[in-house]
Image (cartoon, helix red, strand yellow):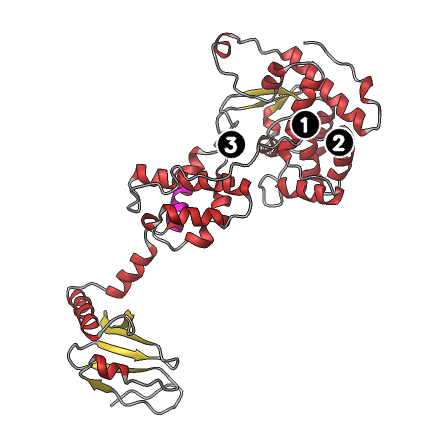
Amino acid sequence: MPRPRRDGQPTRPTTKVKLTDANVRKLQPETKCFLVWDLKIGGLAICVHPTGRMTWKVIYSFTRKLRWLTIGKAYVMDVDKARELAAQALLKVATGVDVQAELKASRGSGTFEELANRYCDEYAKKRNKSWKQAHTLVRNNVLPTWAKLRAADISRSDVKLLLSQISSASVGTQTIPATSAIFGWAIREEISGVKANPCYRIEFEVSAGRERVLSDSEIPQFWAAFDDVGHLQGMALKVILLTGQRPGEVQHMRTEHIADGWWTMPGGPVDDLKWPGTKNAATHRVWLPKPVQAIVADLNGHGLLFRGPRGEPVELSSAMRTVCKRLKVERATPHDLRRTHGTMITSLGFGRDALNRIQNHKAGGIASVYDRHHYSDENKKIMEAVASRIILLVEGGPAANVIQFGR
């Protein structure tokens, strides 16, 4: 006798027939789902939904719990195929395998989302200082489309379609290499069955390199606007403009690395201090001009100077977007402040070598091996000269009055 329904409604009588393709086609939907059981294969049933949709089910007991396994839709699978798959599933159950749990596990394994997360956790966070930017690009532009796709099944046509859906050329230029790195790592580590990199040699529109430099008239406008985007964010942006150092390094600026006016950045990561290391892994020593020393003293902090509410470095890109929006000017990024500082170095006549030294660019060649002179006095003069020009512009004085130091 059928078990009574919890809602008190009468239970539909159990229907068992020798299913055929013909009688399956004759089944009509009712107000509630119902099952029609097959007499030939015990445990096989067809479920008829109120919408008219019909699905094949294998219903079995495992560890005294009822399991419902969907094996296909009736409109794409005939009775003979349903019986074949049901027999295979029930044979596994007889050998102690929970086929429903096995299917759920297989659906979640090998997906691109799983691969991307593994790449980030097991490789990128340990080897790539800019992993956050790459991970954000993949999360925002790739996962919405590829998250549940098997990584091994993604083809070049999938990559081309994805690229066509990214509206910004600059975003596409960055997203495809970030995605390619994930596939390259999977191939090297023999993960998720990936045998080829579908991003390899994909042609995409290369965006022009950024050339944004703040003009003399813009500098005082930006300086004043920095005060309206949050105290720490504004101070950090001013430090980037006054020192020309990389935004990520300024965000992680620590009092432990500052002594006697010099900021010494270790080349490698310092885990205890959560210092990520410099971009080129070279230890870098830069003089902090007087306006920056005043900012550091005003913050009166210990450890991480530009600490967010949760202990993490403050975020600066959104602050710059806010500044540009308020000023109604062409988009500028925190890195453009660094470029502005570098341009001032050369415009004051100090030359590109000085620019490379102060901004910690690797010069390369034999000179980088034999030339160990640290140029401390020269660099100090350059940093003070550039800072003086910026402050003079901010205060409204004529830039022509700034003394230009020779090389």
Visible residue check, residue 305: no
Neighbor class of circle 3 (other Cα within 10 Å; few <14, some 14-19, many 20+) is: many
Horizontally, residue 229 falls left or right of residue 254, namely: right
Report which residue position mark 1 lands on.
Answer: 340
- Mark closer to the observer (1, 3): 1
Per the image, the residue denoted by label 3 is 276
Give amino acid for label 2: Ile
Taking the magenta stretch, the answer to whether it contains residue 277 is no
The answer to whether the residues at label 1 and label 3 have Cβ atoms under 8 Å apart is no
Q: Could you tell me which secondary element the residue under label 1 belongs to?
A: helix
Tell me if mark 2 has few (under 14), some (14-19) or many (20+) residues whose alpha carbon lies within 10 angstroms of its own. Answer: some
Residue 340 visible in rendering:
yes
Q: Is residue 375 above or below residue 11?
A: above
In the figure, is residue 99 to the left or right of 394?
Answer: left
Residue at 15% over, 79% down: 40
Q: Position of residue 185 (x, y in %)?
A: 36, 38
Q: Which residues are magenta?
A: 113-120
Which of the pair 171/367 is nearer the observer? 171
Label 3 with label 2: CB-CB less than 8 Å:
no
C-alpha separation, residue under disc 3 versus residue under disc 2: 30 Å
The image's mark for residue 2 is: none
Q: Nearer the viewer, mark 3 or mark 2?
A: 2
Q: Amino acid at mark 1?
A: Thr
Instruction: Kindly identify which residue carries mark 2.
Output: 219
Mark before the other along the chain sequence, 1 or 3: 3
Report the front residue among 270 and 12: 12
Whether pointer 1 and pointer 2 mark residues with C-beta atoms closer than 8 Å, the reply is: yes
In this rendering, would 171 be left or right of 92? right
Question: Observer-nearest residue: 339 or 263?
Answer: 339
